[in-house]
Amino acid sequence: MQEKNNRTKILIADDEALIRQDIKEILEEAGYEVVAEAKDGYHALELAKLTVPDLMVLDIKMPNINGLEAAEEIQIALNKRIPTVILTAYNQPELIQKAGDVGAFSFLTKPVKPQDLIASIETAKHRAKEMEGLHQDISDLKEKLEIRKLVERAKGIIMKSHSIDEPAAMHHLQKISMDDRIPIKTVAEKIIAENKK
Ligand SMILES: [Mg+2]
């Protein structure tokens, strides 16, 4: 048993009981914890809500809701990104393209070999982490743009009210920020709010 994998809770979904059993054995052998076994996509959604897995191994072809739809619905229902390995019986580029839009996936063609399953799980985890990083970068960028917009507006107000030029207005803003030890964003927000009164 690999100690480091002990805490990864995995949900498995496949409409074939034998494949479920097979995957469960591989995962438990590798030290993962199988918290749910679903027989179709709908069942997977129900069990995911109950068990909140860290990772999922979903068959693509299942009755009712297929693996890709289930992955999407589960992540929406739980409001979290869950690394997911999608099991396919064949390679379908358009399905893989569609899956890429949904989130953190890796693909594995059946029949499943133990070492390939473990590698796919690690790939899915890695992609999930990368996507988290990407989202963080985007929100950092949004925050910076938001600050810049506020500062621009506040500068405009100061230039008008103090009859000073842009560098002087910027200096004024920075001075308040430093003297009062508050972020320049807050200074700008206050000036904008004051101006509205
Ligand atoms: Mg199937």
Image: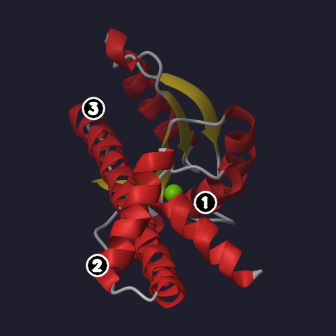
- Tell me which numbered mark, 2 or 3, is placed earlier along the sequence: 3
Quadrant in the picture for residue 2: top left
Name which residue lies at 23% across and 38% down: 119
Name which residue lies at 22% across and 32% down: 115
**Residue at mark 3:** 114
Rendering coords of residue 90 (x, y %): 31, 66
Q: Which of pointers 2 and 3 indicates the residue nearer the eye? A: 2
Q: Is label 3 in a helix, a strand or a loop?
A: helix
Residue type, mark 2 in image: Pro
Q: Is 129 situated left or right of 38 in this image?
A: left
- Tell me which numbered mark, 3 or 1, is placed earlier along the sequence: 1
Q: Mark 2 Cα within 10 Å, few/some/many (few <14, many 20+)?
A: few
**Residue at mark 2:** 167
Q: Mark 3 Cα within 10 Å, few/some/many (few <14, many 20+)?
A: some
Q: Is label 1 in a helix, a strand or a loop?
A: helix
4 or 108: nearer the viewer? 4
Name which residue lies at 71% across and 56% down: 42
